[in-house]
Amino acid sequence: RDAEVPCVLFGRQDDETGCAWFDILGEAAMFDAVSRLAALGHARIGFIGGGMKYAYAPLREAGFRDGMRDAGLDIDDDLIAQDAVTSADGEAAAAKLLAHANPPTALVCAVDFAALGAYRAVDARGLRVGEDVSIIGYDGIPEGAHAQPGLSTYQVDNKSAGERLSSLLIRRVRGEPLEDLRETALANYVARGSIGQAPL
């Protein structure tokens, strides 16, 4: 912005002054994840958020909280963890949540790597993903398809995103108003075996 170089961001920022962007609505995915789990009878749903230094993290947590409220479920702050961006982070966060006196039956994870780490925490407690504990991730990384069971997740179409970013950049170079160069899209839900009915 300071150098007045035309650019387009992949993601939104708190300060939108002078910014054009394309972004995927991660908060909508988190909301939808809670709705899906609530429909399967889950009432104790934990959240493992991403790195709080990133702009997406508070948006995804807000989507989770909105989803819980919309489903009429209590939000237990003890079942919310932050700063999990690696599988090791996810494993540690999930282990803490599952050790709660009244543990969650489902986990919504802001990033897939954390979700895959949560698999190990579930296994360490002698539980089964998709049966005892449901897990939903976000990103659609290839590793999720090869987990056992496969990770249900919200997949980002990076090829399409790249096309949109390129188009927006060309339009910005041509001088279109910034307000016309801000677009969002939804992630695609990929159903696999990591979620199921809430255990009795």
Image (cartoon, rainbow, N blue to C red):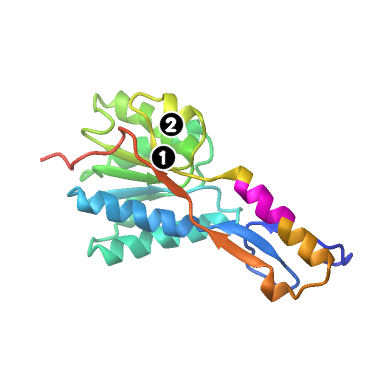
Say the numbered circle drawn on residue 117.
Answer: 2
Query: Percent position (x, y) of residue 156?
Result: 53, 45
Q: Residues within 10 Å of mark 1 (few under 14, many from 20)?
A: many
Cα distance, mark 1 to mark 2? 9 Å
Question: Residue under circle 1?
Answer: 93
Secondary structure under the numbered disc 1 in the rendered image: helix
Question: Where 175 sits versus 38, above or below?
Answer: below
Front residue of this view, candidates 195 and 2 = 195
Compare residues 33 and 97 and report the one nearer the observer: 33
- Marks 1 and 2, the one that precedes in the sequence: 1
Q: Pointers 1 and 2 in contact (CB under 8 A)?
A: yes
Where residue 13 sits in the image (x, y, percent)?
64, 64
* Image: magenta residue range: 160-166
Instruction: Say what secondary structure mark 2 lies in.
Output: helix
User: Farthest residue in the left direction?
Assistant: 200
Q: Position of residue 75 (x, y in %)?
A: 29, 60
Describe residue 3's horizontal placement relative to residue 31 as left or right: right
Is 140 left, or right, of 194 in this rendering? Answer: right
Is 89 situated above or below 30? above
**Mark 1 or 2, which is nearer the eye?**
2
Task: Say which residue appears at 23% left-offset and 61% top-offset.
Answer: 73
- 58 inside magenta stretch: no
Side (left or right) of 15 relative to 72: right
Amino acid carrying label 2: it is Gly
Give the overall secondary structure of the magenta segment. helix
Give x and y (percent) for residue 119. 36, 30
